[in-house]
Amino acid sequence: MRAKSTKYFVEYAGNRFNTYFVWLNYVIINLENFIIYWIYNLLIGIVDLLGVLTMNIEINNFGVIKNANIDIVPLNIFIGSNSSGKSFAARLIHCFNCNDVPNVDEELFVYLEDYLNDNDDSIMELIFNYIQTQPKLNSKPLKIPFDEIKPMLDEVVLKYLARVFEFKIEEEFDLSLNELINSTKSCFSIGINDCELLKRNNESFEFKSSSFTIDDKVNTSKIAIDFDNGSNLLLNIESVLFNITELNDINSLILIILTMIANSIFRDICLKNSYYLIAERSDLVTDNKALTRRIQDKSYFSKNQIDILSKVYSIDPSKKGEFYDLGCEFDKEFSGYLVDIKDTGINNDISYIDEDTNQEVSSKMLSTSIHEMALLSIYLKYVVKKDDLLIIEEPEAHLHPKNQRILVKYIVRAVNNGLKVMLTTHSDYVMEQFNNFIRLNSVDSDSLDEFGYTPEDVLSHEDISIYTFKKDSKKLFIAEKIDINETGFDEETFAPISEELYDESDKIIDMM
């Protein structure tokens, strides 16, 4: 069952201003014009502040994954047999990003309204009395006992965030949450840092937080909130900005405070940005006219296909990204064709320029391997930034082993320059090349030159994590972390297959 669209996500839905002003109608009566402008900038600008640099995610009974406990590091690799949950895990991690920022719309107000209708207004009275003293921002903050405000946080903020991530997960997988519970289990859980999401069969999605903290970046020069070791919520307001004359007017202020807390929790559990390059990516770059016809005919596209197309069509070719030069170097060594964006006047198209002749070449004249790598080149040149996560399914698809080695080299260079990367792979060549780049830590600069490498090609064993997805039962898999040190790693996924193949070959030869 396909998830229904809502107005939670600004960038993807394209209705940032509509959802904002729907919510704004609730508060416009109680706030001066300049505070409205401040709220607008807080909610719209929060995308630039959100995102943690590290994440731990524990997955239980989600799809075919019985258990996976994954630490996100600069380079993350998932290996295992087909249908073992590698892509499932990668796609789930992709859901916890800040690309699509939750926007406060009327639903959060409804949660708050329902809560206030069913509960006493003691917190409102506390804030109202505090406002009447007209404190300055640097005055003694109002202390609200955490035990008193926690029910409101649970019933408003956490319910809202549960709805946000329910939408993100259902949209990513094109399935209902009930369908994502493993068929042999009654629930799934997802733990992220200090938070947990729990889905039981035919029950509401739950969002739990073991601790509430406020990141300083969500505070402003007009409102500041914090928690003092979990005992109290500390509230400091430049109250002169508010025109609050009645107790009911506090609703608007509470909504702003809860918004700031929700954004802080969202920031604490989400990566800054992530981008997903699907395994079937060459179809999106081979024939722009055919693709346009598919769009006009309203052919089905997955969410990740839509994200890729939207990103490519919205690129401004004049604005080069942080990894533009690296993308050009990759093109030259990989194929000799420079992949770039061309503005056709109607929409963007991907162009291929022969490095030797400086002439554009039709995509129909080029190999599948170049088409496979085109989106990676475009994303390096225009899309990804430092600390972003780029997820690539089976990057080795259609590549000769020599080109797989080149690809790995540029992935390592991107990682060493600040990009986070996550891969799913079935390639022994890819894994062994990563192993070699780890081992380069133990050689001197002269040896690097001898191999044709630079310090940018040296991969620290602390910057890579590898998880192998192994069968635990007939339909369930667990992710096991592979040990890595200065000498590299021992990988047992591909070796037994190679040995089996060689043994079979020897027997056949003996029988000839």
Image (tube, grey):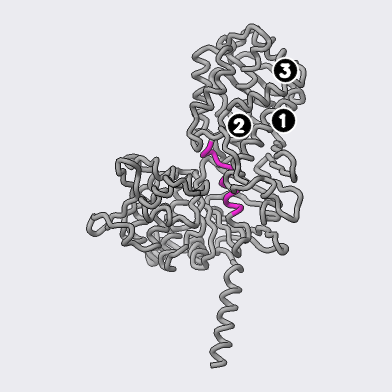
Kind of residue at badge 1: Asp
Which residues are the magenta region? 88-100
> In the figure, is residue 463 to the left or right of 121?
left
Q: Residues within 10 Å of mark 2 (few under 14, many from 20)?
A: many
Quick check: 133 above or below 123? Answer: above
Q: Amino acid at mark 3?
A: Ile
Q: Residue furthest front?
A: 297
What secondary structure is marked by label 1? helix
The circle on residue 154 is: 1
Residue 93 lies in magenta, yes or no?
yes
The residue depicted at 35 percent of the width and 40 percent of the height is 316
Residue 489, image x, y percentages: 58, 64
Label 3: which residue? 123
Could one spot residue 231 in this view of the protein?
no
Spatial separation of the CA atoms under disc 2 and disc 1? 15 Å
Residue denoted by label 2: 264
